[in-house]
Image (tube, rainbow, N blue to C red):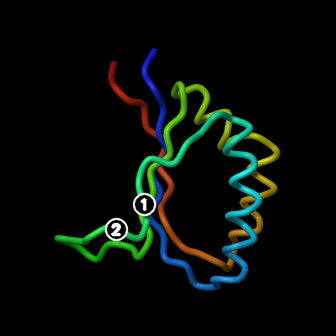
Amino acid sequence: MAKGYLLVSITVTDPDAYARYVQVSAEVLKAFGGRLLVKAETAIIKEGAGRTRNVIFEFESFEKVKAYWDSPEYQAAKLLRIGAADGEFILIEGVD
């Protein structure tokens, strides 16, 4: 079974509020078996506008990352991000 990934590219607009979101969402991430694969602070934008923070999370399957995103727990955490960051969130399936 192919792994699932959450690709995140954001600009933080309110660091204090975003820190609260990270704390809560990290607990949900752990509960769904997700893990951080890259350091957000090391991205170098070579072309295009880019965002200041880029992150990749890995899950055991595409179904698991979808379950994480759609879970009531993450939906509650996501409310903390409103007004704290703008960005793109992409769920994608890996290859075997």
Picture coordinates of residue 49 (x, y %)? Answer: 28, 77
The quarter holding residue 17 reads: bottom right
Tell me: residue 61, above or below residue 65.
above
Picture coordinates of residue 19 (x, y %)? Answer: 69, 73
Q: Which mark is residue 42?
A: 2
Quadrant assignment for the C terminus: top left
* Residue bearing the label numbered 1: 39
**In front of the other: 25 or 82:** 25
Q: State the CA–CA distance, disc 2 to disc 1.
A: 6 Å
Picture coordinates of residue 5 (x, y %)? Answer: 47, 39
Residue at the outermost left position: 47
Picture coordinates of residue 58 (x, y %)? Answer: 49, 38
Q: Residues within 10 Å of mark 2 (few under 14, many from 20)?
A: few
SS type, badge 1: loop
Residue in view at x 77 percent, y 59 percent = 24
Residue in view at x 69 percent, y 42 percent = 30
